[in-house]
Image (cartoon, grey):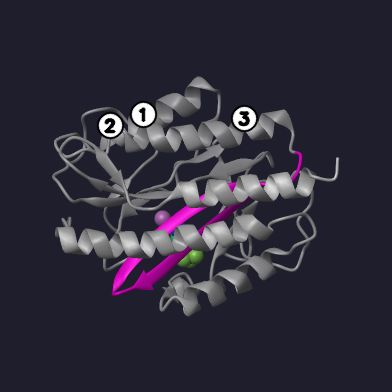
Amino acid sequence: MIIFKTDEEVELIRISATLISSTLAEIAKILKPGLTTLALDKLAAEYIGDHDAVPSFLNYEGYPHHICTSVNDVVVHGMPNDKPLKDGDVVSVDIGVIKNEFHGDHAYTFILGEAAPEVIDLVRVTKECLYEGINHAIAGSYLTNISSAIQRHAESHGYGVVREYVGHGLGRSMHEHPQVPNYGRRNEGILMRENLVLAIEPMLNMGTKDIMVSKDGWTVRTRDGKPSVHFEHDVCTKPEYAQILSNYTLIEIAEKANRNLNTSYY
Ligand code: MF3
Ligand code: CO
């Protein structure tokens, strides 16, 4: 069943989504080589708790951490660990919260220091794919127009689009109907009405689209060991446009400030 939201419910989801954005901005401020992803997990858990919300990933189907940190060839569901991050690493930080009974679920990919140019391109194009998809999250449009826009842009750059994990509806549950694949043909699936809230989350691989799940049961890696990037926004369908409920501006400002700080010794 697809649950369309009231305007009031959409505003509650915006509050949860924005709390994730500000948590990601806190991470953006301090991120640098030498930090561990466990330190990011701790920071996020404390920040979310301090803002009267609960991290939703902890114990979700037995998941043992507060957030997901997916480094380099890890596609999604990377588990925070005590290995220090290195210069040139690319790390997707995915966070879910519940506040006022409504979920937010969104993710951003950070580059640490100087990465290879082809990694920088992959990050840029994955973010572009997210917005290409969002442009079609409009009431009166078909759901798969989101999917096909993402796939078209990704494949025009020769990247592999992950099939096994998809975006989803969002509300009182983290995963509601409908699923939002990052591949597909236009004008199929459901016709969207106003106030459908979706988590749109392209996962692009530099090489093959094929993935494998590690023995820990969570960590999803690319089959060829090449890097993968993941961005996720929470979005609400409106008649003329897509309303983005999460906020990358907060994160991008912090990211730029951090980058200037860490290069100011030249
Ligand atoms: N953000 C992920 C999704 O949309 C959820 C992470 S899985 C969890 O499916 F177990 F960590 F919660
Ligand atoms: Co999600």
Q: Position of residue 256 (x, y in %)?
A: 63, 44
Task: Give the camera-side residue of 102 and 254.
Answer: 254
Asked whether residue 152 is drawn in magenta, I would say no
Residue 41 placement, left or right of 60 = right
Residue 2 vertical position relative to residue 249 in the rendered view, above or below: below
| Alpha carbons under labels 2 and 3: distance apart | 24 Å
Farthest residue to the top: give it. Answer: 156
Residue 143 vertical position relative to residue 167 in the rendered view, above or below: above
Amino acid, disc 2: Asn
Asked whether residue 96 is drawn in magenta, I would say yes
Res 42 → quadrant: bottom right
Mark toward the viewer: 2 or 3:
3
Residue 194 vertical position relative to residue 131 in the rendered view, above or below: below
Dot 3 falls on a residue whose secondary structure is: helix
- Counting labels gives 3
| Alpha carbons under labels 1 and 3: distance apart | 18 Å
Q: Are marks 1 and 2 in contact (CB under 8 Å)?
A: yes
Q: Work out whether mark 1 precedes mark 3 in sequence or the reverse, and give the earlier one.
A: 3
Q: Work out whether mark 2 precedes mark 3 in sequence or the reverse, and give the earlier one.
A: 3
Task: Give the camera-side residue of 260 and 185.
Answer: 260
Query: For the stretch drawn in magenta, what is the main secondary structure?
Result: strand
Amino acid, disc 3: Asp
Q: Which residue is mark 1?
A: 149
Q: Which residue is mark 2?
A: 145
Res 135 → quadrant: top left
Q: Are marks 1 and 3 in contact (CB under 8 Å)?
A: no
Q: Residues within 10 Å of mark 2 (few under 14, many from 20)?
A: many
Q: Which mark is residue 121?
A: 3
The quarter of the rendered structure image containing the C terminus is top right
Residue 263 placement, left or right of 61 = right
The residue sitting at 62% across, 30% down in the picture is 121
- The stretch of residues the image draws in magenta is 90-114
